[in-house]
Image: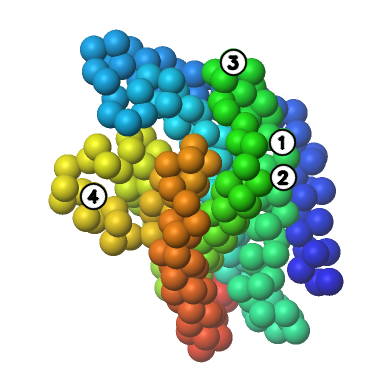
Amino acid sequence: MASWVLARKMFESRLQYSASHAIRTAASVVFGLIYVSIWQGIGESNELGAYGREGMAHYVAFNQVILWLGFVNHGLGLEERVRTGQIALDLMRPLHLFRFAASREAGSILYNAAFTAWPLFVVYALALGLPVPGDPARWLWTVLALLGASYMSVCVGFIIGVTALWTVESRWLSLVHYSFNFILSGFLIPLEWMPGWLQAIAHGSPYPAFHSVPARIYLGQAGADELIVPAVWCALLTLAALGATRLVRHRVEVQGG
């Protein structure tokens, strides 16, 4: 019940900025169309492998749709709570710090799903012919992949957030994370087209679960077995988040006092 209340409150707070988020969504539509146009141009002189021009357009469009499901507030807002001293009260709550931060962020992700991802999906389905699978199983596997990707984003964001207890500024960690995400997740280019050494690095990281896995499942290029590795990463990142919380309890430093 507490988690639901926290998620709902965050969702409602985001509604206050719906106008600015509408502009953000419009910008996302434009960027997606630009990416598609680039690949369409490349496809005029290249076969684009198993994707083809149309398949690559769908791949790019779907990745643009789910992009905002992986974006979380920097450090889940924990850096600011450390700065103000609110973290001390958070640790005194009967609710575990990780659950508290994750529940609040879930509301933000739900907002992004409703007011950014869904509108983008509709636009790209109409403008680019983004396919709508008729197989319920594929929908189920896709939803599970997206839930796993969002959860992993929350875990990584939490781990970055608690580093604020050891460093004055942790925003650079979020920037590094998003940089690796864009490169190693398959968002900019399918993983199978990368050099062998870069593919090895990507598959040894959790990043393919953010884009490559959901996109391949949705487009029918992979099945439920693709969810095994992301599930393992979800478990590992959960343990890391819980371990980070334990460290936090032994080091609460409020800057300025």
Q: Secondary structure at mark 4?
A: helix
Where does label 3 land, which residue? 127
Callout 3–callout 4 Cβ contact below 8 Å: no
Q: Earlier in the sequence, mark 4 or mark 2?
A: 2
Callout 3–callout 2 Cβ contact below 8 Å: no
Where does label 4 land, which residue? 199
Q: Earlier in the sequence, mark 3 or mark 2?
A: 2
Where the C terminus falls, by quadrant? bottom right
Q: Residue 168: percent from the left, percent from the top?
A: 44, 64
Query: Disc 4 residue type?
Result: Gln
Q: Secondary structure at mark 1?
A: helix
The relative height of residue 83 versus residue 185 in the rendered view (above or below) is below
Q: Secondary structure at mark 3?
A: helix
Could you tell whether 11 is left or right of 87 in the image?
Answer: right
Question: Disc 1 to disc 4, how far (Cα)?
Answer: 33 Å
Question: Disc 1 to disc 3, how far (Cα)?
Answer: 18 Å
Q: Residue 195: percent from the left, percent from the top?
A: 17, 42
Callout 2–callout 1 Cβ contact below 8 Å: yes
